[in-house]
Amino acid sequence: MGWLSNLLLPGRLRTGPTALLPERPDPKTLLAIAQLADPDARLDGDDVIAGGSRILAPVELAGEILGKLGVTDTEKLWACRVAAEGPLPIDYFDKGLAEGIAYRLGGWSLTQGEPTDLADSDKRGALVYLPAAPDAEEVVALLGETVRPVESLDSDRWPDGELVHGIVHIPVNRGVVTDAYAGADVMVTIEEGNRIPPAAQVHWPYLTEIVVARVSVLEPAPASEADTEDDAPGNETADGAADSGPAGSETAGAADADHDIDHDAGTGEGAEPPAADPAEDAAADDEPGEAAEEFDEEALLARVSLALALANRLQGIATDQGGFQLAEPEDILPARYV
């Protein structure tokens, strides 16, 4: 590599999107990963073409170049830069492609900043793309077979909800969200939109709109936290003030329900944050961190298993948040191709 290339390379890699990898990837491995996001991906010499983007052949980085990229704790890395082919990729597909490659090869993503470790990113969320909206009865029946049921309907949290076979069905019909379904610890929201990833375009080239089933953690009801505070020692003096407040508890419950649906079924590409449970935090303090991590991983794999079951029953495809297809639950875990 010439001195001019050495001078310009760090800037090009830093602006990215770039996947920084601990080992040189085989072209066939890169192609296999790219085909998870775009089944029509193909080799072009040493490069890979996928979704209107070109994954450039890996370049070895060491010494001064790594320092310019902000990497100081390793002697050598391999960089795969992703460049747009023609017009800019739709919905930042090139950025998602670099992140997906780094995630599956145990590396880091680099886009206009410092390297980012994606092992705990929102790539661990599960989606199901469907060609049409499913019947509520079919979704309830499937969830009733696969998730922990709800014992009773919380009418404050779900004022419009209906408990059927242990599953709460909430018709929403607000914005892009049409329906929501809740089990004891998981939520599935049904959304409609026109952002169709390449993996879905290949399956249904005729579609102009698509349905997304988003599987996420069901967070504890905000009302439960308030009740806990009211029962705590020293809060007796606040009871009168609480009783003298506005007589709008049902309205507040409806607002909480709206918040739950908006939070769990956001239209963006956000992560699915875990529930903040004080009891779980205390348990984590008493046990090694590895045990807590295994518990989180087990719950994650259960959600992906649910997404795969939905995809199989409803004739859809399951992907992570980046649009990479999932064939089995373990595909959601990082460094699967190392």
Image: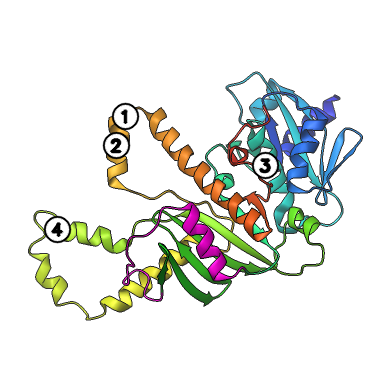
Helix, strand or loop status at disc 1: loop
Instruction: Depth check: give the residue in front, 148 or 289.
Output: 148
- Cα distance in 3D space between marks 4 and 3: 46 Å
Q: Which of marks 4 and 1 is nearer the N terminus?
A: 4
Is disc 2 surrounded by few (<14), some (14 to 19) or many (20+) residues within 10 Å?
few
Q: Mark 2 is on which residue type?
A: Ala
Q: Where residue 35 sits in the image (x, y, percent)?
A: 78, 43
Q: Mark 3 is on which residue type?
A: Gly
Q: Residue 283 carries which label?
A: 2
Give the residue at mark 3. 100
- Cα distance in 3D space between marks 2 and 1: 6 Å
The reply, left or right, for residue 12 in relation to residue 177 is right
- Cα distance in 3D space between marks 2 and 3: 33 Å
Q: Is residue 135 magenta?
A: yes
Q: Earlier in the sequence, mark 4 or mark 3?
A: 3
Q: What stretch is highlighted in magenta?
A: 134-160
- Cα distance in 3D space between marks 4 and 2: 22 Å
Is disc 4 surrounded by few (<14), some (14 to 19) or many (20+) residues within 10 Å?
few
Give the residue at mark 1. 287
In the image, residue 14 above or below residue 156: above
Q: Mark 4 is on which residue type?
A: Asp
Q: Where residue 165 sits in the image (x, y, percent)?
A: 42, 64
Instruction: Depth check: give the residue in front, 313 or 116.
Output: 313
Q: Residue 231 carries which label?
A: 4
Tell me if residue 14 can be seen: no
